[in-house]
Image (spheres, rainbow, N blue to C red):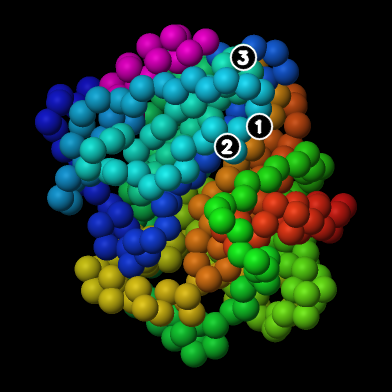
Amino acid sequence: MEDAGSTIPAHPFALNHPDRHTAWVVVLVARGEDRLVDPGLVQDRLDLLPTVSPLVAGRLRGGHWSIDTPPVVEVVPGPVEFQPALPLHPFDLAGEAPLRVVIGGDGTWLALCAHHFAFDGLGMVSVLRSLLTGHLERASVYTATSVSSQPESRWPLFRRLVRPVDPVAPSRPSPSGEVLESQPVELSGKRITARLADACSRAVVAHNRARGERIDRIGITAAVGGVGGDSATYRRIDLDVGDPVLSAVDAALAVEEVPRDAVSVPRAARLLAPVLGRLSDTILVSNLGRLDLVGVHRVDFFPVARGRSAVAFGAASARGGESTLSIRARRLDRHDARSLLERAIAEMA
């Protein structure tokens, strides 16, 4: 274990990303059909977890993570009406660990809220498994290095700036906060991530057209599992409405090199803050896959929703249990978010 006071270099993504308004809180909720966890036992395991995953006890100071103390488990009353109980407010990364652990009072569910600058979705799964079983796993962090040696074209960035993709039509009036919704879905066969991107894109097109809002171009960020042991990254796909989404996503996922800004984000990137809206996606789609989690019947995964559109879809399956598709939105009310999610699930069929 890193001694108290030891440090780990922070990824430039955390230090220099121009978006300083998003809370960057990723959410993972595990549910059991019966009692799943004991708060005291989870706290004991959490206290030991920094021996293999030191960022569980990290504090961001300067350009490094200093290893301090892990968080304290929070127990909340009531059933798995988890969103009101979830601490989605921004982290004070200098003063608190980049992880929050919440357990329902009846012990049937456990939620992790982690800062995306410290943990990706797969890293959170490792943390979750450690807390459920006591077999401590090392969680992946931002260490991506698989970038092409060839100069990366800036044309896609310039094209986004000149011709932004269209956002998901927001609710009116604007909601007061984020909405998180999740429902069971049938996920089987191959090309699940591409099929999810296709279904969610079709749902967005129908959503916008039903509201008389423009939808000519769609920008998709598709999350990708780590390459060669690196942490999870992403691929960006820009399409005109009517272009084949499946083949475009398949082609993007087949590219091994990660986007350069997932590896190196210069300090000058902060200057892009005024134009971030023009560079943002229509939707983000992330599929965690089929997860082996002892005693877990269902997993709800909520990636970060950000940008001008601020809509993210997350999929996850518990082996032997249910598969779910979630939506997380900052500019949709609960009715519109639920309708968009249900439309995407219908498109998956």
Return the residue at label 2: 84
Which numbered tag is attached to residue 106?
3
Which segment is the magenta one? 38-53
Q: What residue is at 22 percent from the left and 22 percent from the top?
A: 1
Q: Is residue 15 left or right of residue 247?
A: left
Q: Are marks 2 and 1 in contact (CB under 8 Å)?
A: yes
Secondary structure type for disc 3: loop
Q: Is residue 86 left or right of residue 94?
A: right
Question: Where 94 falls versus 238 (above or below)?
Answer: above
Q: Label 3 is placed on what type of residue?
A: Asp
Q: Is residue 326 left or right of residue 87?
A: right
Q: Is residue 298 visible?
A: yes
The question of residue 136 being in magenta is answered with no
Q: Position of residue 329 (x, y in %)?
A: 60, 56
The question of residue 43 being in magenta is answered with yes
Return the residue at label 1: 81
Foreground of the two, 63 or 90: 90
Question: Where 112 falls versus 11 (above or below)?
Answer: above
Question: Where 228 falls versus 40 (above or below)?
Answer: below
Q: Please tell me whether mark 2 or mark 3 is closer to you in this view.
A: 2
Q: What residue is at 74 percent from the left and 59 percent from the top?
A: 336
Secondary structure type for disc 1: loop
Residue 78: image quadrant is top right
Label 2 crowd bin: few (<14), some (14–19), many (20+), radius 10 Å: few
Q: Are marks 2 and 3 in contact (CB under 8 Å)?
A: no
Sequence-wise, the earlier of marks 2 and 3 is: 2
Q: CA distance from mark 3 to mark 1?
A: 12 Å
